[in-house]
Image (spheres, rainbow, N blue to C red):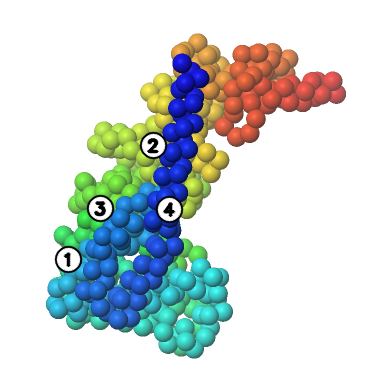
Amino acid sequence: MRAQIAILTIVLGILLTELHAQDVDKYPYTELGRISARLDDLVYNRQDFDSALALCMNSYTVELSAYWAGKGAVEEDYVNKFENYAHLIENYSDYDRGPLGLYFRARGIEAELWEIVARGGLLEYSKSKEWVELYPHKLENYYWQLITEFPHCKLAAFACYLLAVQYDQFPDIYVLDRSDSYAQDYGPALRDTLSSLYQSIIRDYPESVFPTTERLPNGIYFSRRGIKIAPIAQWQFAQIWTKRGGPSSIYDVPRAIQEYRYLIDHFPDAIDTDSTLLAVKACWAQLDFYSNKYMYRDFNDFKKARTVCQRLLDDFPNVRISFPQEYASIETHPAAYLKLAEIESDIPMALDYYEKVIYGFPGSCKGGEDGPVDYAVVALNELVQNLNNAELSIAACRKVLESPLPVRIRASAQWCLANIYSDDLKDQDRAIQELQRVVDEFGDVATYYRGTYGEWATAAIRGLQRRINK
């Protein structure tokens, strides 16, 4: 029977491969680029929106999109582009397509700009006369013309948002007076411009939604069709008050806290383009100000930090928040308990918070540049480092070892136990015994970085033996 199943699997694989090859011949990847270029010419240069819509709705384009959807980030960008163009032309043609024409003029220049960035030629090109006269000020003017001539059009809020994104990414080019030197402090000018745009969205366009689903050209910001723009504008508005360093510095932490609080109170159910509750992200941003002892020591307030942690635990579900620029992500409930443990001065209470993480979230992971790590393991390591109480730490590790928790967590507990005897109690002989248990009981368990616990423990035993023999 197994042999028959194996043969059938091979035959099916061959058939699927042949069918895929036929589909690729029928819908080649190069067709995505060809249609995309044709559409760009129609909307950016010719402003022939009827022909562009017909091309988007063409049966071949629809079939091509359906075939390549979900097959990769680049392919998905093409598919989203075709859908975005069709949606814009069908639903944002108010005012005789005047705003739509200005929008596509601006996005056309923006596309050219980011092609230059992708080729790595931005620095030299930005010094040229063509850059000064065309990029970015003509782009800027198209957006401002749309906003001022058609303030009630459907695209006005999105134009404000896109303009703010441009200013935020290239403040030295847009906001700095053309005649001034690069080194001038233009933080106030940037602050005023961004504030005006974001507040305009929040005040004047509270119901407007993103008309497209795309990675905006800078790769940092995203839009998602149907998501309200105003709450995300409020999130961006709060973030601008923490810029520091360089001539575009805007640094006002109390104002940032105030704006995050406004977001939490006025947009409690709003979601970001990644489907994360913005209020949860705002709570975590506030928590960083109140508890980060390194970056925001002057604004630390552990009483307020506890209040925010409790609100995260009581009022919001446990969700994952990503920090793409830091290649990290957290789950809010175990992270809140770890934060409570970190700032708690009462040792038994801190231990209780750590154990809530260890036993309450055994399957939860913290994302990082080196990959995911179990929150239980993070809690064990922080417990050992922060409690400064070897007796309690040993008891906590032994409790984990006697539990039915996953083997990778118990392996970490045994490793921590050995470290307590070695580093805190300076009992090297006992540390070697505990390390030998790591080898014997958890030798094949992979660590969260490289190698196995057995390999780590064997190397540690050799190191301790050399230290003893000296």
Tell me the mark number nearer the camera, choosing from 4 and 1: 4
Q: Which residue is mark 1?
A: 91
Q: Tag 4: Cα neighbours inside 10 Å, few (<14), some, or many (≥20)? A: some
Going from the N terminus, do you reach mark 1 or mark 2 first?
Answer: 1
Quadrant in which the C terminus is drawn = top right
Q: Residue at x 40, y 79 (%)?
A: 136
Label 3 – label 1 distance at C-alpha? 29 Å
* Circle number at residue 263: 3
Q: Which residue is mark 4?
A: 24
- Where is residue 243? Give x, y as percent: 43, 62
Going from the N terminus, do you reach mark 2 or mark 4 first?
Answer: 4
Give 126 or 231, whichever is nearer the viewer. Answer: 126
Q: In this image, 385 relative to 29: left or right?
A: right
- Where is residue 14? Give x, y as percent: 47, 38
SS class of the residue under badge 1?
helix
Give 252 or 26, whichever is nearer the viewer. Answer: 26
Q: Residue at x 26, y 49 (%)?
A: 271
Residue kind at label 2, given as amino acid type: Glu
SS class of the residue under badge 2?
strand
Whether residue 456 is visible = yes
Give 158 or 20, whichever is nearer the viewer. Answer: 20
Tell me the mark number nearer the camera, choosing from 1 and 2: 1
- Where is residue 98? Give x, y as percent: 19, 79
Q: Residue at x 47, y 53 (%)?
A: 325
Tell me if label 3 and label 4 are in contact, CB under 8 Å: no
Label 3 – label 4 distance at C-alpha? 47 Å
Label 2 – label 4 distance at C-alpha? 40 Å
Residue kind at label 4, given as amino acid type: Val
* Circle number at residue 331: 2
